[in-house]
Amino acid sequence: MSLIGKLRQAEYQGREVALQGISRAYNSLEEAQSRLRRKMRIHPRAAKPSVPVFVSVQKNDETTGSPEPIVTVNGHDLPPTKTENTEEQVA
């Protein structure tokens, strides 16, 4: 094999090695990007109520009878006097 043939063979081998290295680097980059995306992915969390919920505990005596029902319209509790008017308007 002549000197020119050896140079061409070395050039070909160098080109192949370079292409393989670029291919490996490209695959590594894609894998790293995939890992980053996976880590940065936003997962939905449990929904928190926008308005805090307050619960009042009322001691129920047997002599007072049953308590008045609580009527809520659009997220706001109505007083017992407005409850009757609201029921009439709806019906």
Image (cartoon, rainbow, N blue to C red):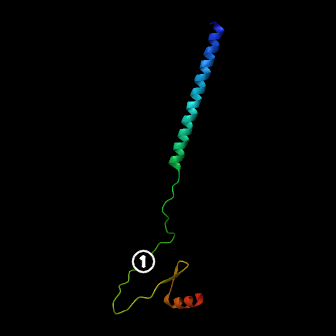
Q: Nearer the viewer, residue 10 or 48?
A: 10
Q: Nearer the viewer, residue 49 or 34?
A: 34
Q: Which residue is mark 1?
A: 55
Residue at the location (53% across, 44% down)? 36
Relative vertical location of residue 57 with respect to residue 17 in this rendering, above or below: below
- The quadrant of the picture occupied by the C terminus is bottom right
Horizontal side of residue 8 vs 76, given as left or right: right
Going by the picture, which residue comes out furthest to the top? 2
Whole-percent x, y for residue 4 in the image:
66, 9
Quarter of the image where one finds residue 19: top right
Q: Is residue 52 above or below residue 46?
A: below
Q: Is residue 38 left or right of residue 14?
A: left
Residue at the far right: name it.
4
Q: Position of residue 44 (x, y in %)?
A: 51, 58
x 44%, y 76%: residue: 54
Question: In which quadrant of the rendered view does residue 34 lie?
Answer: top right
Quarter where residue 16 is shown: top right
Secondary structure found at label 1: loop
Quadrant of image for the N terminus: top right
> Residue 15: where, in percent of width, then height?
62, 22
Q: Rate crowding at label 1 as few (under 14), some (14 to 19) or many (20 or more) other CA atoms within 10 Å.
A: few
Residue in view at x 61 percent, y 15 percent: 10
Q: Is residue 79 left or right of residue 90?
A: left
Circle 1: residue type: Val
Horizontal and vertical percent for residue 63? 34, 93
* Rendered residue at 55%/31% (across/down): 24
